Amino acid sequence: MSEYWIGIDTGGTFTDLVLADPASGHWHYHKVPTRTADPAQGILDGIGEIIELAAVQPADVGFLVLGTTLATNAVLEGKWARTALMATSGFGDVLALARQRRPHYFNLDVRKPVPPVAADCCAEVVERLDADGEVVRALDETSVLAAIDQLKSTGAAAVAVCFLHAYQNPQHEARVRELIHAQWPDVHVCLSSDVLPEYREYERFVTTVVNASLVPIMDAYLARFEAGVEDIGVSSAAHVMQSNGGAATTATVRERPINTFFSGPAGGAMGAVALGEETGVRNLITFDMGGTSTDVCLIRDGRPAMKNERDMGGFPVQTRTIDIHTIGAGGGSIAWIDAGGMLKVGPQSAGAYPGPAAYGRGGELPTVTDANVILGRLSPASLLGGRMDMYPERAFDAVESVVAGSIRKSVEDSAIGILEIANAHMTGAVRVISVEQGEDPRDYTLVAFGGAGPLHAADVALMAGMRYVIVPSRPGVFSAQGLLQSDRRADFSLTRMTAANETSLPVLNAGLVELQRRGDAWLHAEKIDDVTTDVRYEWQIDLRYEGQNSVLIVDLPDASLNAGKIRQAIDEYHERHKALYGYDLPKQAVEVVNLRLTIVAVHGRIGVASTTATDAIEGKPQSPATRRVWFVSTGFIETPVIARDQLAPGVVFQGPAIVEQMDTTTVIPPGSSVRVDAGRHLHIDLHPNS
């Protein structure tokens, strides 16, 4: 019996689904509008539809993974659960004090973000640990019980327990959890020593509180999702994509919803990693443009850049994530005129409903999609393989009424302005993750996907100085495909602030043993057998010069440190510091800050589908139709319109061209050369004669 895999990527406008047969390498694709009012039901409907379209039995589905934006949207919109905080006596104001910095130094009108914990939802208890984790004042359980009674009256659905220096010694927090469960069994409890056992009080507090505020929301959402999947007849455990590029079971994600902030975009990044392995192109910049936003990520030598802290709604949430930069620019981004009469695009979006004016769902505001329709880049007749009618006259009316009249330009010139502003925004995002990180974008290839990515990729690449673009065979559902190319993964860390020398070896090795224990517990909870599954352990150490504030992460060979390995780590730290900052301090003492462990349980890869092209003769697409299309270098010209399924492996052709398929449209500018590889991916050379 074959076991099929299903990946679901929920975006702001569309939900993408893929069903793959790992044995044959065949894929099935489906795309449905996102139900913003009831996302879980929309996903379940899509699962049922793709199973029916693929003509498989639900019981034969062996792996199902979901990419979700629920946690991200809840934080950005402030729609979290009512949350309480229990803190060490005297430290209940840590969240309010924060870092005592304005969000923007030169803008006095920007308000600080409001944390999930209201003033009346904070309770302090008597206890105290010192910086080494030694008990200074024993936990007063009477004060804990009083705090529980106080917080019960607030109606909180979750409680975050954050004690001073609990990262060194979790015993007080663990005891408080026992008391809360006994006195208040229906509330969700998050301990800072579990969520983020690292130093820095504010970051640990805010990370734990944000996580706690999301647990009730994600718990209810995933419970409904799991029940719906079972009702469909899928018996295998459902998984959720995490921000670190790995999947985990819903049970794990319910406890750590902060690990899903970049769930869907992470699928796209991992899909690009797999694409790089397949094509041999190891240095990539991903360009994922959807209906609401655009996500970009730098992949160097086959590995995506990673971060340990992300700003979410103004909060410095510390969790291991792929370094994905997101801006509010997508096909649904609304064009508008500001008070000074200037044309602006985004970040407001028309979403899936009512959507762009050209969709005919009641939208009356002009969007980037409407501009593409007016400029001939999008089909004026239909999208999604003919399943979605287009109304170009409504796009024309929207741009004319909102933009053209205000800036005294023609509708076509106004559409050009909308397009160029959107492209400038997205080029800026590419520079953030490349130039601003010391990387030259000219050394990278742009991988374009998402429903709108291939529409804009060539223009963005040219503006960024890049020469090459790859458009995957199924760019509109590429992130959903990437979900199925991802391994199971978990990241663990703990603080061990000590000198980087031989005298600290007992402390450091004890910390590594503790990380190993936590990793083994995760493998057991995920039901991963490390005997039959390829499980990889990756060890790291955070080092800094004594007196510095920031750290650099250095790889360790294994989980056992000795004098030689410490010396090797210090030498590597000096080298990396000099490479990044232009200098090193070889005579300066180095100290350890954190120890880290990443566990990767390899899930396997799916081969390229063996499909046969239709109507492809002698390496050229047959008798393409044409339409009038606008390009930066030429203005409007008659342009061949080619069906993607006509492009067999080995086909080479020149731009200009429009390549259409069910899930996206690719714009190929004049002067470009296109090659179709064995996997039916388009390789675009923007300067073939240089």
Image (cartoon, grey):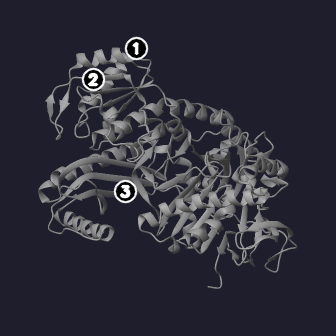
Does residue 237 appear left or right of residue 573 in this picture? right
Expressed as whole percent of the image width and height from the top left, the position of residue 497 reads: 20, 49
Asked if residue 223 is positioned above or below residue 464 in the image, the reply reads above
Which structural element holds mark 2? strand
Q: Label 2 near label 1: C-beta < 8 Å? A: no
Mark 2 vs mark 3: in front: 2
Q: How much space separates mark 1 and mark 3, taking CA atoms?
A: 45 Å
Q: How much space separates mark 2 and mark 3, taking CA atoms?
A: 39 Å
Q: Which residue is mark 2?
A: 124
Occupied quadrant, residue 573: bottom left
First in residue order: circle 2 vs circle 3: 2
Which residue appears farthest toward the bottom when viewing the image?
689
Q: Amino acid at mark 3?
A: Tyr
Expressed as whole percent of the image width and height from the top left, the position of residue 601 reads: 45, 54
Asked if residue 653 is positioned above or below residue 337 in the image, the reply reads below
Q: Nearer the viewer, residue 354 or 6?
A: 354
Q: Residue at x 21, y 23 (%)?
A: 126
Q: Label 3 near label 1: C-beta < 8 Å? A: no
Q: Residue at x 47, y 65 (%)?
A: 434
Does residue 193 appear left or right of residue 294 in this picture? left
Q: Amino acid at mark 1?
A: Ser
- Label 2: few (<14), some (14–19) or many (≥20) C-alpha neighbours in 10 Å: many
Q: Which residue is mark 1?
A: 153
Q: Amino acid at mark 2?
A: Glu
Q: Which residue is mark 3?
A: 537
Q: Quadrant of the C terminus?
A: bottom right
Does residue 494 appear left or right of residue 22 in this picture? left
Mark 1 vs mark 3: in front: 1
First in residue order: circle 1 vs circle 2: 2
Q: How much space separates mark 1 and mark 2, taking CA atoms?
A: 15 Å
Expressed as whole percent of the image width and height from the top left, the position of residue 283 reads: 51, 70
